[in-house]
Image (cartoon, rainbow, N blue to C red):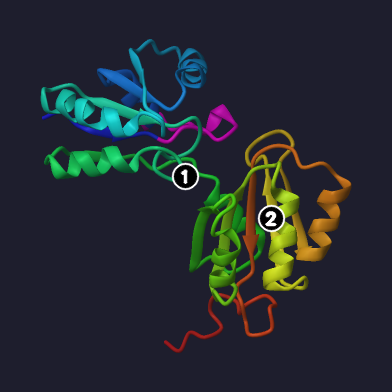
Amino acid sequence: MAKLYIVPTPIGNLEDITLRAINVLREVDFILAEDTRTTSHLLRHLGIEKPMHSHHKFNEHATVGRVAESIAAGRDVALVSDAGTPGISDPGFLLVRKCVEEGIEVVTLPGATALIPAVVQSGFPCDRFCFEGFLPQKKGRMKRLAELRAEQRTLILYESPYRVVKCLEQLAEVFGAERRVAVVREITKKFEECVRGTIDEVLAHFKAHEPKGEFVIVVAGYDGRGEQGMSGDEDDED
C-alpha cells in the first residue's frame, strides 16, 4: 500500500540531508513542496528528477483530499517544506490528519529542525521545554506572552528578523528585563550566531547590530523572580 512520507530538509547546510531522506525522495512517485523553486534547488544538488506539486498554507485545504486519493490509488508521496520538518511551523498537519482519517500510513523521517539545536546550545534546561513557534503577529500577541510569563519550562519562539527587536522589547516588558535569553540565528549556516544574556543585554546587541537571517529565541523558564529556572535535574528525587 502506498504511503505519505514526511521528509525533513536542511535548514541551511545542505549536508544535513539524511541518506534515508535522499532515498525516499528518489523513490516516491511525486513530491509535494512548499515552494517548488526552493525544492528544485535541493533536488538538483542531489541529482534527483521528480515531479513536484505545490503544497503550501494558501492551498493545502483544497489539495489534501486529492493528495490522499492519489496515495490511496497507489502513488507514494513525499511532503517537504522549504526547510526543516513539515508540520513544525510549516504546512503538513492537515495532510497528515487527512491520511490518518483515511487509514493511509504516514511515515515521518527524523531530520533537521531549528528548535532542537537552539534549545540545546542555549545553555538552559532542555529536558523539558515549551515550543510556541511563531507568536500571533498582532491580535492576541501580548495576551499570549502574559500567559507564558510564569511558564517554568524553557520557552522556544520562532521570529522574523524584522520583528526580533520588537519581540525582545515585548519580552522585557512582560517577562522582566533580567530574564535570561539566548537568541540563535542562521543555524547550520556560515554566519550562525548565539547571543546570550539578559533580555536587556541581548536587546541592546540587536539594536546595535541589524538582525539578519532566521531566528530562534530561547527564554529561560520562570523561577518566581523572572530569572533563569532550575537546572534540569535539581528537583529529581529518584
Q: Position of residue 3 (x, y in %)?
A: 19, 32
* Distance CA(mark 2)–CA(mark 1): 18 Å
Q: Quadrant of the N terminus?
A: top left
Among the 4 quarters of the image, the one containing residue 107? top left
Q: Mark 1 — residue? A: 89
**Position above or below: 217 against 100:** below
Is 192 placed left or right of 147 in the picture? right
Q: Position of residue 165 (x, y in %)?
A: 75, 51
Is 98 placed left or right of 110 in the picture? left
The amino acid at mark 1 is: Ser
**Position above or below: 91 against 69:** below
Work out whether mark 2 precedes mark 1 in sequence or the reverse, and give the earlier one.
1
Q: Quadrant of the C terminus?
A: bottom left
Among the 4 quarters of the image, the one containing residue 161? top right
Q: Find out whether residue 17 is within the magenta segment.
A: yes
The amino acid at mark 2 is: Cys
Q: Mark 2 — residue? A: 167
Which residue is pictured at 40% across the width and 13% down the height? 48
Q: Give the SS element for disc 2.
A: helix
Is 141 placed left or right of 72 in the picture? right
Which residue is pictured at 54% across the width and 59% down the height? 140
Q: Position of residue 62 (x, y in %)?
A: 28, 29
Which residue is pictured at 19% across the width and 39% down the height? 99
The outermost residue toward the front is 139
Magenta-drawn segment = 8-20
Q: Position of residue 28 (x, y in %)?
A: 27, 21
